[in-house]
Amino acid sequence: MRKRTDAHRVAVAVMPGAPIFELAVPCEVFGISRPELADPWYEFRLCATEPGATIAGGFTSTSPCGLDDLAAADTVIVPACANVHSRQPDGLVAAVAQAYERGARIAAICSGAFVLAQAGLLDGRRATTHWMHADELRRRFPRVDVDETVIFAQDGRIHTSAGTAAGIDLCIELVRHDHGTTVANALARRMVTPPHRGADQAQYILAPLPTTKTSSLAGVMAWAIDHLDQPIRLRDLAARANLSERQLTRRFLETHGRTPGGWLTRERLRRAQELLEQTDLTVDAVASRSGFATAAGLRAAFTKHLHTAPSDYRNTWRAV
């Protein structure tokens, strides 16, 4: 594994009354040294919004780090807050805004999105939160484009996630951004969790959606993933789901927050990333095996969605 000399600094806000699970997730992902996966891993710190903050379950923070340390980090993570109906701590909001102005990456788990929204960082951006809090976030911060159907969302340097376990998905995705797909997948295996979940938050929302909607898509999605190297048309997916093309598109949007074509492109990009990292296949061969047909099509997709070229991606993330 290629060794680097600088460690990416990750700081997690510790607020009084914060739920323990959402706080524990970034501690597990970023706070445990894993030099066998990437060396160095991360420089991790817990930053209390006030000295001796007591979080849910009776745990008390003894970390010497505070909001100044939070504002100086490369990545700032705000776990769920104690009360979404209350104004969030002004000091924390200011520190998060200061970190963003410095160029830091900002991530919120679950209702931590309310802190980002109060800081104005979600204005005009697509963001998500726990589906139970989506209407409150939308009501209090109408300039935020709230999408409660997805597990996590990215808009530039701003990342948000749905509730509880979705924080794991978000943190693994941040590792993927930093260290590539191979490292993220290895971390997910150690945590005994999928490297990326195919289902999105919409399946958990208490709304009058027939249960057949999710199950009718599961089979066709599994088939598509097994046949990514082949041409797949919308009518092929619709026929396998026993739906019209319009019905299939509507159900994908309701359940996954994206069209069938958008979902298929995402899966093909992930396949291409894995092949570039783990094999010596030419770019043409990677394009063929991931379903982009030509190297030009693969390059165009990488440029549009990953903002890099396949060869540059391989040079950056190839394990050596």
Image (cartoon, helix red, strand yellow):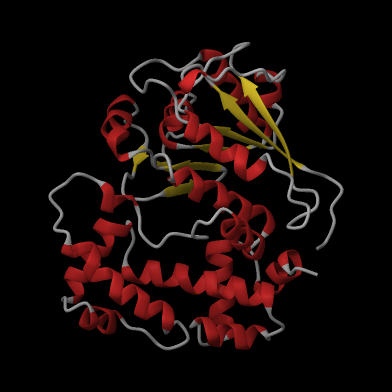
Q: Residue 111's x, y, as percent?
A: 41, 31
Q: Which residue: 87% across, 48% down?
A: 5
Q: Residue 91's x, y, as percent?
A: 57, 14
Q: Residue 255's x, y, as percent?
A: 27, 58
Toward the top, the furthest residue is 51
Q: Residue 52's x, y, as percent?
A: 61, 12
> In the image, is residue 51 above or below residue 293?
above
Front in this rendered view, residue 320 or 156: 320
Q: Is residue 14 visible?
A: yes
Toward the front, the furthest residue is 58
Q: Which residue: 37% across, 35% down?
A: 144
Q: Quadrant of residue 46?
A: top right
Q: Is residue 155 visible?
A: no
Q: Which residue: 16% across, 76% down?
A: 244
Q: Quadrant of residue 275?
A: bottom right
> In the image, is residue 70 above or below residue 128?
above
Quadrant (top left/top right/bottom left/bottom right) for the C terminus = bottom right
Q: Which residue: 44% across, 25% down?
A: 81
Quadrant (top left/top right/bottom left/bottom right) for the N terminus = bottom right
137 sits left or right of 278 in the view: left
Front in this rendered view, residue 177 or 53: 53
Numbered disc total: 0
> In the image, is residue 179 above or below residue 22?
below
